[in-house]
Image: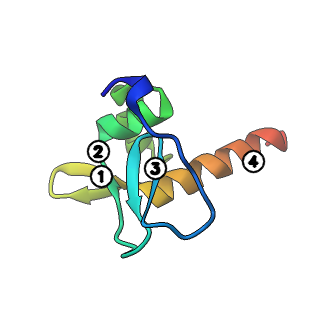
Amino acid sequence: MMQDQRMYQVTAAPVAACYIWGFAMDKAGMSPTFLTVEEVAEMLRVSPRSVYDWVSQGIIPHRKAGRRTIFLLSEILEWTANCRTNANSGK
């Protein structure tokens, strides 16, 4: 998917869907949105290898589904917010 074709709308008001970094999150049914390693890497603008390294070091929140590594969008967004807060506070 091309970068300029994505929708980057984030809203605090309840809506049917919220698009963050091009990934849909269903707010109506509150069903969890899972991401692959490749999607997380694209979202964070790092290589998939970096994501795998963070998983093996226990740095990034993740789940295992058999042999697959998956991520909850809500946990990744919270994790990135915490990283940004820690970086701004000098920790």
Which is more foreground, mark 4 or mark 3? 3
How packed is label 2: few (under 14 Cα within 10 Å), some, or many (20 or more)?
some
Numbered disc 2: secondary structure: loop
- 79 on left or right of 1: right
- For badge 3, the amino acid type reads Tyr
Give me the C-alpha separation between circle 2 and circle 1: 5 Å
Q: Is residue 64 above or below residue 54?
A: below
The first of marks 4 and 3 along the sequence is 3
- Mark yes or no: residue 61 visible: no
Numbered disc 1: secondary structure: strand
- The one of 87 and 81 positioned closer to us in this rendering: 81
Disc ID at residue 19? 3
Residue 42, image x and y in percent?
40, 31
Residue drawn at the location 41% of the way across and 41% of the way down: 22
The first of marks 2 and 1 along the sequence is 2
Numbered disc 3: secondary structure: strand
Residue 76, image x and y in percent?
49, 51
Q: Which residue is mark 1?
A: 70
Q: Where's the N terminus, which quadrant?
A: top left
Q: Which residue is mark 4?
A: 85
- For badge 4, the amino acid type reads Thr
- 31 on left or right of 67: right
The first of marks 4 and 1 along the sequence is 1
- For badge 1, the amino acid type reads Ile
